[in-house]
């Protein structure tokens, strides 16, 4: 059950209208790494979570908080659009000074939402459900959550430096702080799950099941010019789970065959002829 509370999680108050900034903020509302994405991602992971209740409870707690963040951003966008009108946009085309502020307004804020936030990114591309990850594997999902929070916080930090509006910045500071804590939460969950099951997803398919393919689990194939990649800890030393030692393959050689597919039936009108591949 969800229940809406009228008060926002944090105060949202702008110093002055700024339609251009409203358009930019759409990215952290309805973009790939915006609040709509993390809201839906955590909620669907929580809805579908089976097993230990603490993980489900954490997912639902944070997912529900993100609903509030979506509402905060909609309020922020609305305040930044206060006073905007179609006449303002038309006038902006005549006056370069006004155009610097009003010329970048998202027309959909006037035509579609009536000066409100939209479920789109900063270019008007609609939010897409394929942005979210809810696989049913806790460790895989928690890593996706950490990635989503990292990208989202990065974008809010960039937006912070794109405005001097102290009211907007105050809201961003709250969001940045919460996004930082959410990263901590996912890190802690990841650490616990790795200690319990191992660092590789899925843990239910162990290395032994790879049979003859196990050596490939530790080889770094150098497939670009130079050998600088050899300098990283991913190319030398032990695997994080201690199951093997890395090997740097400086000049890797292909181990497979040359594909020799059958030519389809002529009814497919492919205009292909059979070419015999010589065996080595």
Image (spheres, rainbow, N blue to C red):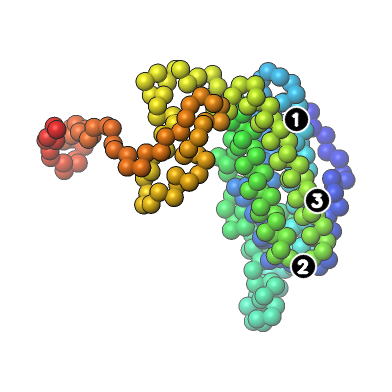
Q: Nearer the viewer, residue 131 or 95?
A: 131
Q: Position of residue 250 (x, y in %)?
A: 36, 42
Among the two numbered marks 2 and 1 on one chain, the one whose residue lies closer to the N terminus: 1
Kind of element beneath mark 1: helix
Question: How far is disc 2 from disc 1 in space, using C-alphas?
Answer: 35 Å
Q: Are marks 1 and 3 in contact (CB under 8 Å)?
A: no
Kind of element beneath mark 2: loop
Question: How far is disc 3 from disc 2 in space, using C-alphas?
Answer: 16 Å
Name the residue beneath numbered marker 2: 164
Q: In the displayed structure, does residue 182 sit left or right of residue 30?
A: right
Q: Quadrant of the N terminus?
A: top right
The picture quadrant where one finds residue 274 is top left
Name the residue beneath numbered marker 3: 174
Q: Position of residue 9 (x, y in %)?
A: 84, 45
Q: Determine the residue positioned at 80% across, 51% down.
A: 174
Q: Determine the residue positioned at 40% across, 29% down.
A: 216
Q: Determine the residue positioned at 77% across, 67% down.
A: 164
Q: Position of residue 186 (x, y in %)?
A: 69, 35
Q: In the displayed structure, does residue 6 sit left or right of residue 146?
A: right
């Amino acid at each position: 059950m969800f229940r809406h509370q009228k008060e926002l999680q944090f105060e949202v108050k702008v110093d002055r209208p700024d339609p251009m900034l409203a358009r930019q903020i759409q990215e952290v509302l309805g973009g790939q790494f915006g609040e709509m994405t993390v809201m839906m991602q955590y909620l669907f992971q929580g809805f579908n979570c089976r097993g230990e209740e603490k993980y489900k409870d954490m997912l639902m707690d944070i997912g529900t908080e993100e609903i509030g963040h979506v509402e905060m951003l909609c309020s922020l966008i609305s305040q930044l659009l206060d006073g905007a009108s179609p006449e303002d946009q038309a006038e902006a085309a005549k006056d370069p000074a006004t155009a610097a502020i009003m010329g970048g307004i998202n027309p959909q804020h006037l035509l579609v939402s009536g000066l409100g936030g939209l479920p789109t990114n900063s270019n008007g591309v609609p939010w897409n459900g394929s942005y979210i990850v809810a696989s049913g594997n806790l460790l895989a999902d928690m890593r996706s959550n950490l990635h989503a929070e990292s990208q989202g916080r990065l974008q809010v930090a960039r937006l912070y430096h794109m405005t001097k509006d102290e009211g907007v910045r105050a809201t961003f500071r709250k969001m940045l702080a919460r996004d930082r804590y959410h990263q901590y939460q996912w890190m802690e969950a990841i650490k616990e799950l790795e200690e319990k099951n191992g660092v590789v997803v899925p843990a239910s398919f162990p290395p032994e099941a790879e049979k003859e393919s196990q050596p490939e689990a530790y080889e770094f194939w150098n497939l670009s010019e130079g050998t600088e990649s050899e300098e990283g800890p991913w190319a030398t030393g032990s695997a994080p789970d201690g199951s093997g030692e890395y090997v740097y393959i400086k000049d890797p050689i292909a181990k497979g065959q040359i594909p020799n597919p059958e030519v389809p039936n002529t009814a497919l009108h492919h205009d292909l002829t059979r070419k015999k591949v010589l065996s080595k």
